[in-house]
């Protein structure tokens, strides 16, 4: 429909242009015409013929006068009579026979002359008829009248000449103006024509630009969803007509939201542009087209010869999109998940392909990061029935998670020195409180784990900042973060951002890491720990002894604390081997220069043993069970007596939620 | 019979209209007068002046035409020999043009085409009467404007010379 609108617009504009051109033409013609009429009038006014005619009459009248003078001088001579007769005949022809109608019209003042001259001619005829000797007094009378008539005719002749001169000058001016008008008209024509051509060219440029903008995304320069709507079907038809496959790859940047939150939208946009640049390299006219569908959702539509070619293409793209990239001076770990649907196997319309590619993408994300999944009809039922993930997402959206806190005691000073934050899911539907072990494995299968981590961090920091002023300077809050998140590379910066926004000093925060972190990507893990500590955060090696995390890491990385798993502590009263191991671990920690924390302390005997062995800190049911935020605030108030009292509205909400 | 005559006349008119110039001589009716006396004009050939009488030129055949003139009112009836015949008679038939001087000093040149292409008259009479000096005589040039409309343009106006005194060749 926009195309049609554009066409009518063009028609309208053309019509307007024609009307303007016609108007201009009429004005120019009118101007030229009026100039021409002026010249024509002037030419009419020249009255050359009448001027010459006046001259002729003047000539004959002069001859008439001369013959009279001669006759007066010698009235007896026959020659005088003959001359008089000739002059009178000539005058007769001029003043009587000749038609002077146009002369009267052109020189109105001449009108009386003819009649007066005709009277004189008649008088002279009478004198001539009388014969010799001539009647001198009568001749003198006629000569006197002729003389005054002559001066009058001369006066008319010169004034008419002046009039002609003036008219000629005017005509010249009119002609000059007409020439100018013609020149200006021609210039105007040229300028108008040139302007029209320029406008047309400009219009075409703008139209092309508009079409480009309508079909392309401004941030990345890639084709956009509108383009896909317009040309996707064409590509599909091309593939159908040439017995080839159409591969639709839907590409999603993993943790894009987190990158946006950590570094700001500028970096997020730059990353998108970077990815777009990579995809752009794969573009082939009419064959491979990268598209930005919206947000961080990208796609590649490609016509491929066969399965093998498609596999090569998607392999190449996947390889290029899962790497470390340098964006705005930051090294980011780029991970992308790709969902693929192909014509004709997975649908024969673009909509169906798009839906199936989305389902494949969802599967890819469920299976962890950086995966490429090709659509399989079996997926549909799985996704539709996969309620647990949906429930989890819903819970995140509904903010059904809350933090529980367990205090940490310094055995050396017998004082409260920190707290560990634990996550609980208070299911709104069932009302039951779920432990991390119940839902974290599920969350870790998808991107939900990032949302959960983010939420934990924000909540913990917000809470800690409430206490900060009232607490001892060495009061530390421990937070558990998923290994996936820690491995993302940008976590330290993200954490710094969150702490900064909450106004919390980094020294207050301790990130608990487990040995499993080092299994997947040691280099990144070491780098993350180093960065965290570099930013002022504390790092604790958690679950020590429970997993593969061993003493070896103590030698390789710098941490602040070592947390002995509760499994080791339980039963040490009766198990001498455990006691020996703990002694060894504590000794190892000492050697590595880290503080030792004992978790899961339950009996006074255990505490006594640990104190004796020189364990620095401990937490467990012996001191306190993990308590919800509200309870823990009260606990802190009792034990520190400097924590501010809870604000009423907040307390109410919490109580209700509990 | 009368129908046939009308048809023939109509055909003649049509033919006349479409006739090419050059076959003009038959267009004007010939009239006869008694041989006049008196001089018509002088011919100057190689510096020598020869007098030509009215009887001589009327002897070449007198034609009549009714025409308007650029100088006078109304339609006038002129009679006189064809200029072409006169020019031939006075031996200037091969001249590209003739120069005619009038009694009052006015002079004009008439090119050969004029007398070849139309029945230009050297009029000696008006309404059958010989032209006097007062009538612009004894001879004057007459372009039959009604008979040959091509003559009715300003170009020919100064060629209507009267009071003719001399004729000579222009080379």
Image (cartoon, coloured by chain):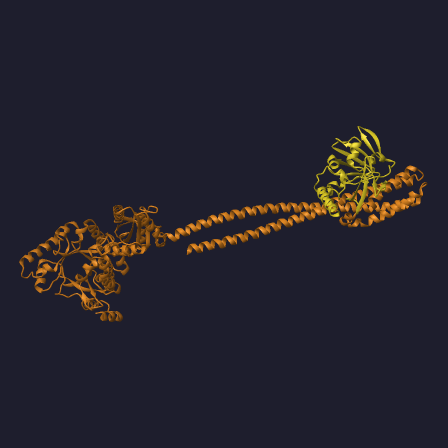
Chain colours: A orange, B yellow
- Percent across and percent down for residue B156 are 74, 40
Q: On the picture, is A336 further left or further right than B113?
A: left
Is the C terminus of chain A in the top left, top right, bottom left or bottom right quadrant? bottom left
In depth, the one of A216 and A631 nearer the eye is: A216
A307 in relation to A262, above or below: above
Q: On the picture, is A35 further left or further right than A246?
A: right
Q: Is residue A464 among the parts visible in the rendering?
A: no
Point out the residue furthest to the front here: B1
Is the N terminus of chain A in the top left, top right, bottom left or bottom right quadrant? bottom left
Q: On the picture, is B149 further left or further right than A121?
A: left
In depth, the one of A387 and A238 nearer the eye is: A238
Give the quadrant of residue A64.
top right
Q: On the picture, is A301 further left or further right than B168?
A: left
Q: How many marks?
A: 0
- Percent across and percent down for residue A186 are 57, 46
In depth, the one of B135 and A15 nearer the eye is: B135
A412 in relation to A520, above or below: below
- Percent across and percent down for residue B158 are 76, 40
Q: Is residue A159 among the parts visible in the rendering?
A: yes
- Percent across and percent down for residue B5 are 74, 45
């Amino acid at each position: 429909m926009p195309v049609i609108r554009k066409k009518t617009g063009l028609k309208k504009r053309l019509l307007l242009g024609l009307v303007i051109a016609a108007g201009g033409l009429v004005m120019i013609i009118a101007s030229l015409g009026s100039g021409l009429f002026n010249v024509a009038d002037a030419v009419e006014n020249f009255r050359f013929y009448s001027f010459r005619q006046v001259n002729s009459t003047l000539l004959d009248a002069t001859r008439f006068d001369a013959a009279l003078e001669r006759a007066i001088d010698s009235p007896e001579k026959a020659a005088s009579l003959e001359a008089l007769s000739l002059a009178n005949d000539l005058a007769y022809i001029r003043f009587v026979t000749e038609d002077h109608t146009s002369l009267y019209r052109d020189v109105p003042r001449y009108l009386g002359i003819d009649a007066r001259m005709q009277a004189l001619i008649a008088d002279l005829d009478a004198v001539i008829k009388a014969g010799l000797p001539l009647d001198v007094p009568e001749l003198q009378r006629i000569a006197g009248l002729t003389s005054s008539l002559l001066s009058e005719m001369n006066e008319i002749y010169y004034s008419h000449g002046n009039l002609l001169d003036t008219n000629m000058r005017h005509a010249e001016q009119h002609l000059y103006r007409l020439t100018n008008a013609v020149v200006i008209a021609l210039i105007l024509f040229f300028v108008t024509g040139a302007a029209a051509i320029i406008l047309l060219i400009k219009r075409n440029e703008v139209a092309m630009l508009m079409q480009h903008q309508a079909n392309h995304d401004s941030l990345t320069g890639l084709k956009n969803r509108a383009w896909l709507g317009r040309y996707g079907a064409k590509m599909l038809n091309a593939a159908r007509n040439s017995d080839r496959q159409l591969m639709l790859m839907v590409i999603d940047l993993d943790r894009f939201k987190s990158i946006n939150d950590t570094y700001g939208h500028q970096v997020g946009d730059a990353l998108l542009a970077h990815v777009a640049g990579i995809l752009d390299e794969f573009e082939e006219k009419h064959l491979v087209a990268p598209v930005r569908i919206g947000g961080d959702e990208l796609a590649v539509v490609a016509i491929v010869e066969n399965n093998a070619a498609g596999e090569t293409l998607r392999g190449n793209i996947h390889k290029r999109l899962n790497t470390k990239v340098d964006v705005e001076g930051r090294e980011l770990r780029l991970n992308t998940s790709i969902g693929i649907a192909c014509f004709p196997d997975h649908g024969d319309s673009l909509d169906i392909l798009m839906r199936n590619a989305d389902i494949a993408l969802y599967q890819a994300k469920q299976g962890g990061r950086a995966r490429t999944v090709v659509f399989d009809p079996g997926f549909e039922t799985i996704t539709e029935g996969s309620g647990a993930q949906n429930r989890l997402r819903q819970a995140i959206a509904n903010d059904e998670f809350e933090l529980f806190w367990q205090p940490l005691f310094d055995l050396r000073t017998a004082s409260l020195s920190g707290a560990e934050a634990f996550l609980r899911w208070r299911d709104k539907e069932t009302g039951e409180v779920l432990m991390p072990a119940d839902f974290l494995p599920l969350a870790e299968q998808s991107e939900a784990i990032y949302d959960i981590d983010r939420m934990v961090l924000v909540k913990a920091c917000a809470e800690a900042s409430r206490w900060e002023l009232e607490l001892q300077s060495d009061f530390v809050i421990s937070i558990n973060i998923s290994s996936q998140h820690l491995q993302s590379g940008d976590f330290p910066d993200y954490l710094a951002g969150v702490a900064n926004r909450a106004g919390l000093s980094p020294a207050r925060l301790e990130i608990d890491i487990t040995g499993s972190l080092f299994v997947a990507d040691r280099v990144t893990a070491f780098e993350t720990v180093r960065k965290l500590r570099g930013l002022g955060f504390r790092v604790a090696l958690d679950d020590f002894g429970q997993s593969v995390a061993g003493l070896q890491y103590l030698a390789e990385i710098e941490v602040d604390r070592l947390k002995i798993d509760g499994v080791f502590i339980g039963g040490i009263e009766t198990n001498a081997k455990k006691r020996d191991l703990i002694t060894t671990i504590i000794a190892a920690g000492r050697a590595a220069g880290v503080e030792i924390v004992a978790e899961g302390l339950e009996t006074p005997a255990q505490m006594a043993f640990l104190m004796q062995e020189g364990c620095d800190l401990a937490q467990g049911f012996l001191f306190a069970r993990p308590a919800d935020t509200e309870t823990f605030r009260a606990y802190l108030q009792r034990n520190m007596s400097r924590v501010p009292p809870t604000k009423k509205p907040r307390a109410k909400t919490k109580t209700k939620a509990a | 019979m009368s129908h046939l005559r009308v048809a023939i006349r109509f055909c003649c008119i049509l033919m006349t209209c479409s006739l090419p110039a050059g076959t003009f001589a038959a267009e004007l009716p010939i009239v006869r007068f008694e041989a006049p006396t008196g001089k018509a004009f002088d011919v100057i050939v190689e510096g020598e002046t020869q007098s030509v009488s009215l009887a001589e030129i009327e002897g070449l055949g007198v034609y009549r035409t009714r025409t308007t003139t650029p100088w006078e009112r109304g339609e006038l009836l002129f009679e006189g020999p064809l200029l072409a015949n006169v020019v031939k008679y006075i031996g200037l038939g091969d001249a590209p043009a003739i120069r005619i001087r009038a009694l009052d000093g006015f002079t004009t040149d008439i090119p050969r085409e004029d007398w070849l292409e139309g029945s230009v008259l050297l009029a000696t009479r008006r309404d059958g009467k010989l032209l006097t000096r007062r009538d612009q005589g004894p001879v004057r040039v007459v372009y039959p404007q009604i008979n040959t409309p091509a003559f009715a343009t300003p170009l020919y106006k100064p060629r209507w010379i009267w009071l003719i005194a001399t004729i000579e060749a222009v080379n």
